[in-house]
């Protein structure tokens, strides 16, 4: 009896609920809205807020009812419950979009009913409602749903008032944040008139560091909006104050936005004022500030990029083949310096660089680089010339006996040096322009070289051998590889010792000075570059950030582009250090960007310095190799043909991975091989890339195989220019795929045939002769999936070509007979695709729909 009583009660509740639902269904949309909008239940009113957009859509045909809904929205906005108001504000952007779409029927709906709610909620007492209204305001601005006049007259004054000194701390901070986000949307004029004065005032708010932190975090955006003039006059003084704020969070925010501030400043301000300010952030007492500063250092350096950063990239194009060293060579001087020497010298000698340990010589009293004329034969990057820095006075010609024995091992005939007459002519041509500091520096170097020629005559007797058989300051010989770098430097520059009275110049001191000199450049302030180069110092990882090396690697291409290839010697050691870093994430970062760096440096520097590192990445972890693989084509196309061809032997190594389940690695290899086809000859493609393609076609992962089939079709296109190679490859395809024991192989053959016709990889005559007969044999294949793809190929591809339906084709009869047999196939899918031409099907979708599973 108790169970029966419970059953009756349950039945009564259910009937009551059904009556309640049926009553709601009988109400109009406006009736339901009126019923629940005044409900005492909070959840009912929240439901009303959520259903406002649906209600508007239901009554969109009646303008009067739409206005009635909007009036009830205004009523709901007065709700005392914060969650209801927040729910309503979340719906406002969607309702505004609806009103915009139906603007003819309900004009002024947004500005009259919705915008006042958004503005009022910006100063709501509840934090949730304020934040929701701020998010809605940004969405409305991004979607351009607000009139510019409404923004300027209604929204902006409210936000400015919220940042007044008497506002609460939270409201002031939130209002300043929304002002900074709105600035790029409202434009320069409104920002300068309404926002900029209050922004400058808030930057100096000594009571609330949260406000200053918000200003610092958005400082770059504000600078980019108001432009360079307002930035330097009004904002930079505030920025300097924020960078020296007593709260480390404010200084950290300044470091993070430094690049944007620098981009909005003039080059003079950037170099003279911002550089020293950034150095102070790098040496900040707070580790978090230093960490943020080092992360932004590369970005800040990139803002110094200008004409000088890429002048070297066009140096070789601007000069004829008479120019022996382009800007690609190691340690080149800026292009302008070299042009000056060549022009002022009357074109008699080629302007070449004075290389000292792979760097341009820099006078101790000047930052200008000096170039030295040299013979037109290419010289080794490691060959060091006689220069005034090492020989600050004329040394006494006494040869170190130990050095003489070393020189005996490396002596080779050298090219004739410039004689005294040629040097004197160059000096005479430059003397009229001696007032130019750069020209004066070049004259000093040429004068030192002139003294060196006089010294050579005294050294001949000491060596007791013909002049052409010994090393000289202007020789282009390449020292033996087994000698140390220090021995090479001493041998190439004829390291002379002085009398016993004078102290010898030690190799260690020269090496340190040379190393410091090799980092000199004039594109960015030297202090910034030195700080950047120090990011590979192991001590930085302990005192700043464990990830600092990865940040250095990430920004290195940008720094290299800024410095230009003529200053690559400044970054070479750092790059090699990063390439051998113990953290694979650092090497992975370099691997993903090595192709960009190669594009910056050019073919000569790439071959000399990047190719060895590229080769090491090829043998690294899969996490590093994938970076090389994804841009394999981009890198190899920048190499010389002979160097590029050597990698044909290494491509098969990509088939071996640390994890055999890493099928995406092989899929990427197939995609890169498609691009690599254009870099190699048909014979190389047949000998090296063809085996890789066939191997990938038999991969156990479906996605890899389908990508490889496209690779096979592109190989057919590549080999179509050579008849013998094409016939051989097509015969191999028939043997390996059409006659395969696996149905997936036979299906692949049909797909390759379809691709070959769709992409016009070979002529229709060649296809009809070599591929069509074995393709038609698949009509009797026992697997329906193979016959389905065959039917699609015949109906959707072959019969769309006039060639296959005309009497010109000798296979027309066999083609029609095969199609008739497929139209009477026992499988309904085969009959369907053989009988009609489905307009909704696509090549990839149809083909892959009949494949096996992924594994």
Image (cartoon, rainbow, N blue to C red):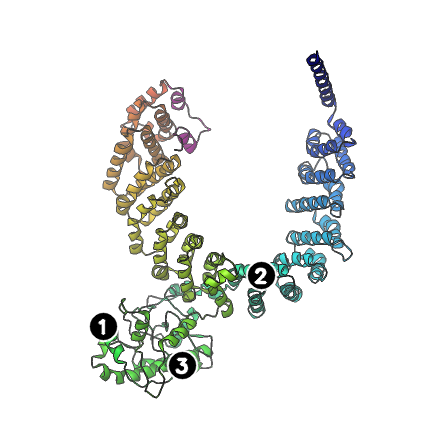
Task: Give the structural element (helix, strand or loop) at label 3.
Answer: helix
Image quarter hosting the N terminus: top right
Q: Which mark is residue 289?
A: 2
> In terms of image quadrants, where is residue 30?
top right
In the rendered image, residue 847 lying in the magenta stretch gets the answer: yes
- Label pair 2/3, CB-CB below 8 angstroms: no
- Label pair 2/1, CB-CB below 8 angstroms: no
Mark 2 is surrounded, within 10 Å at the Cα level, by few (under 14), some (14 to 19) or many (20 or more) other residues, namely: many
**Residue at (47% x, 75% y) in the render:** 367
Q: Is residue 412 visible?
A: no
Q: CA distance from mark 3 to mark 1?
A: 33 Å
Q: In the image, is residue 157 above or below residue 816?
A: below
Task: Give the structural element (helix, strand or loop) at label 1.
Answer: helix
Which residues fall within the magenta stretch? 827-855
> In terms of image quadrants, where is residue 692?
top left
Q: Position of residue 463 (x, y in %)?
A: 23, 81
Mark 3 is surrounded, within 10 Å at the Cα level, by few (under 14), some (14 to 19) or many (20 or more) other residues, namely: some
In the rendered image, residue 5 lying in the magenta stretch gets the answer: no
Q: Is residue 18 left or right of residue 813?
A: right
Q: Is residue 55 left or right of residue 40?
A: left
> In terms of image quadrants, where is residue 275?
bottom right
Q: Which mark is residue 444?
A: 3
Q: Is residue 594 visible?
A: yes
Mark positioned earlier in the residue sequence (2 or 3): 2
């Amino acid at each position: 009896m108790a169970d029966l009583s419970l059953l009756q009660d349950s039945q009564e509740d259910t009937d009551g609920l059904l009556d309640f639902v049926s009553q709601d269904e009988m109400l109009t949309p406006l009736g339901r809205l009126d019923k629940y909008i005044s409900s005492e239940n909070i959840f009912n009113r929240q439901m009303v807020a959520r259903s406002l957009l649906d209600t508007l859509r239901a009554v969109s045909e009646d303008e009067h009812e739409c206005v009635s809904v909007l009036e009830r929205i205004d009523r709901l906005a007065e709700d005392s419950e914060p969650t209801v108001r927040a729910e309503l504000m979340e719906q406002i952007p969607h309702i505004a979009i609806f009103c915009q779409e139906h603007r003819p029927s309900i004009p002024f709906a947004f500005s009259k009913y919705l915008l006042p709610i958004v503005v009022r909620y910006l100063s709501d007492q509840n934090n949730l409602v304020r934040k929701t209204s701020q998010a809605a305001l940004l969405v409305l601005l991004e979607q351009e749903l607000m009139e510019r006049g409404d923004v300027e007259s209604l929204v902006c004054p409210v936000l400015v008032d919220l940042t007044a000194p008497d506002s609460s701390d939270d409201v002031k901070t939130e209002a300043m944040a929304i002002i900074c986000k709105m600035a790029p949307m409202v434009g320069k004029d409104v920002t300068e008139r309404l926002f900029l004065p209050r922004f400058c005032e808030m930057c100096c708010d000594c009571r609330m560091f949260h406000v200053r932190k918000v200003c610092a975090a958005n400082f770059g955006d504000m600078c980019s909006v108001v432009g360079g003039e307002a930035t330097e006059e009004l904002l930079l003084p505030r920025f300097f104050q924020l960078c020296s704020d007593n709260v480390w969070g404010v200084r950290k925010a300044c470091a993070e936005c430094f690049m944007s501030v620098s981009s909005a400043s003039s080059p003079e301000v950037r170099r003279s004022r911002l550089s020293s300010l950034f150095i102070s952030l790098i040496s900040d007492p707070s580790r978090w500030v230093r960490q943020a500063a080092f992360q932004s250092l590369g970005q800040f350096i990139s803002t110094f990029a200008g004409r000088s950063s890429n002048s070297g990239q066009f140096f070789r194009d601007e000069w004829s083949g008479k120019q022996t060293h382009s800007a690609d060579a190691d340690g080149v001087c800026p292009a302008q310096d070299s042009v000056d020497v060549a022009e002022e010298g009357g074109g008699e000698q080629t302007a070449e660089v004075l290389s000292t340990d792979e760097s341009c010589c820099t006078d101790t009293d000047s930052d200008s680089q000096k170039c030295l004329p040299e013979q037109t034969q290419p010289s080794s990057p490691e060959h060091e010339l006689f220069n005034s820095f090492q020989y600050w006075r004329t040394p006494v010609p006494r040869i170190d006996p130990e050095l003489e024995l070393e020189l005996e091992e490396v002596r080779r005939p050298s090219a004739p040096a410039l004689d005294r007459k040629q040097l004197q002519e160059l000096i005479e041509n430059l003397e009229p322009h001696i007032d130019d500091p750069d020209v004066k520096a070049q004259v000093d170097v040429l004068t030192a070289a002139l003294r060196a020629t006089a010294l050579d005559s005294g050294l001949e007797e000491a060596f007791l051998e013909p002049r052409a058989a010994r090393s000289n300051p202007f020789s282009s010989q390449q020292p033996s590889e087994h000698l140390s770098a220090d021995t090479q430097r001493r041998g190439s520059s004829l390291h002379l010792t002085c009398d016993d009275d004078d102290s010898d110049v030690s190799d260690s001191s020269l090496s340190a000075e040379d190393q410091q000199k090799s980092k000199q450049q004039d594109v960015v302030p030297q202090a910034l570059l030195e700080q950047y180069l120090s990011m590979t110092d192991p001590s930085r990882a302990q005192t700043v950030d464990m990830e600092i090396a990865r940040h250095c690697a990430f920004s290195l291409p940008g720094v290299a582009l800024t410095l230009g290839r003529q200053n690559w010697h400044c970054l070479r050691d750092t790059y090699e250090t990063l390439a051998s870093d113990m953290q694979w994430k650092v090497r992975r970062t370099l691997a993903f960007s090595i192709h960009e760096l190669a594009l910056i440096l050019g073919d000569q520097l790439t071959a000399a310095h990047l190719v060895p590192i590229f080769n090491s990445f090829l043998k690294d972890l899969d996490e590093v190799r994938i970076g090389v693989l994804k841009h394999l084509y981009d890198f190899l196309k920048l190499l010389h043909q002979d160097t590029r061809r050597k990698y044909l032997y290494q491509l098969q190594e990509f088939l071996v991975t640390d994890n055999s389940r890493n099928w995406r690695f092989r899929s990427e290899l197939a995609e890169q091989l498609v691009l690599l086809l254009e870099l190699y000859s048909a014979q190389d493609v047949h000998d090296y890339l063809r085996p890789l393609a066939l191997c990938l076609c038999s991969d156990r992962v479906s996605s890899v195989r389908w990508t490889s089939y496209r690779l096979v079709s592109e190989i057919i296109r590549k080999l179509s220019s050579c008849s013998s190679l094409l016939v051989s490859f097509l015969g191999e395809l028939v043997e390996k795929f059409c006659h395969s024991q696996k149905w997936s192989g036979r299906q692949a053959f049909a797909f390759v045939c379809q691709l070959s016709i769709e992409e016009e990889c070979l002529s229709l005559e060649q296809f009809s002769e070599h591929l069509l007969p074995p393709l038609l044999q698949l009509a009797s294949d026992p697997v329906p999936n193979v016959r389905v793809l065959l039917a699609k190929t015949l109906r959707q591809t072959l019969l769309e070509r006039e060639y296959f339906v005309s009497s010109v084709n000798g296979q027309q009869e066999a083609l029609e007979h095969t199609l008739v047999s497929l139209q009477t196939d026992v499988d309904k899918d085969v009959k369907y695709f053989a009988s009609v031409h489905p307009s909704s099907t696509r090549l990839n979708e149809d083909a892959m729909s009949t494949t096996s599973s992924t594994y």
